[in-house]
Amino acid sequence: MAPEGIIGHTVIGSGPEKVIILHGWWGDYTAYGSMLPFLDRDSFTYAFMDCRGYGKSREMTGHHSIDQIAADALALADHLGWDEFHTIGHSMGGMVVQKIMHKAVGRVKSAVAITPVPASGSSLDEDGRALFHGAATNDDNRIGILNFLTSSRLSKSWYNYVVRRSHETTSIEAFHDYMLAWTETDFVDEVKGNETPLLVLVGEYDQAITAEAMTHTLLEWFPNATFDIIQNSGHFPMLETPARLATLMENYLYKHS
């Protein structure tokens, strides 16, 4: 258990290169569980952080906001004694990665944004707002969103599993609040031109975070951004193609270590 005031986290590995890794909207760090056996623990030390209201931080009070997640991540790096580190984030966590790149210029050696929400947020039309706003209390909404994010390619059992884990690892309040955070927060003007090396990854079958969307956002804003498409994956490569995600991530980190 983390000391009082320090965000909940799990440290894996003992390598010299330090990595803060953030989960997305759908659940705590255990979403990365299928990927853990494929990580290079001799080269990297990973700190998997749980955002407030999720996992090991489920009972922590405070704001459920992009700024708060970034502040907690930087406080965690300080607590661990990491002057320099890499950072990785998925979806909502990928949005936070962009904020950390801005707030910790000179400390972040490189970053990986996995199917990331852009720093401009994710605007929703009227139907989208109804679908996402209702997801905190309606599992049919959650299933509908998951189908969209994966092009309806996966089994009923897979969708039910992700929904079940979202309930087990998050509070309803935090789940709803973070939806507002990643849809309504906009800090593009803060981050444009940031020169931190950044790898942007999208899934072939993700209908929300697409290659086209990244071309007009992150790849345009960040001069040292590179891009790859993960084949046979939707929005959740850590669950759909974990070995491939681990390989792409670590190959990039090696280059910037």
Image: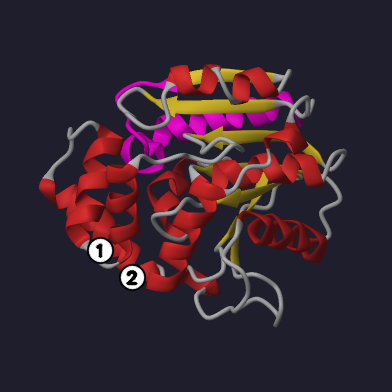
| Range of residues picked out in magenta | 229-257
Task: Tell how many labels.
Answer: 2
Split into 4 quadrants, where in the image is the N terminus?
A: bottom right
Q: Looking at numbered disc 2 in the image, what kind of residue is underneath it?
A: Glu
> Where does the image place residue 91, in percent across and percent down from the top left?
48, 42
Where 86 falls versus 81 (above or below)? above
Is 6 positioned to the left or the right of 40 in the image?
Answer: right
Q: What element carries label 2?
A: helix
The residue located at (70%, 23%) in the rendering is 222
Where 254 falls versus 35 (above or below)? above
Q: Can residue 216 be seen in this view?
A: yes
Asked if residue 125 is among those painted magenta in the image, a careful observer would answer no
> Where does the image place residue 88, in percent across and percent down from the top left?
61, 42
Disc sitting over residue 168 in the figure: 2
The colour scheme applied to this rendered structure is secondary structure
> Where does the image place residue 125, in percent across and percent down from the top left?
35, 39
Disc sitting over residue 221 in the figure: none
Q: Is mark 1 on a helix, strand or loop?
A: helix
The residue located at (35%, 34%) in the rendering is 241
Q: In which quarter of the image is residue 47?
A: bottom right
Q: Can residue 171 be seen in this view?
A: no
Disc sitting over residue 164 in the figure: 1
Is 242 positioned to the left or the right of 94 in the image?
Answer: left
The residue located at (56%, 63%) in the rendering is 51
Split into 4 quadrants, where in the image is the C terminus?
A: top right
Secondary structure mostly seen in the magenta stretch: helix
Whether the residues at callouts 1 and 2 have beta carbons within 8 Å, the answer is yes
Q: Quadrant of residue 2?
A: bottom right
Q: Looking at numbered disc 1 in the image, what kind of residue is underneath it?
A: Arg
Q: How crowded is mark 2: few (under 14 residues within 10 Å), some or many (20 or more)?
A: few
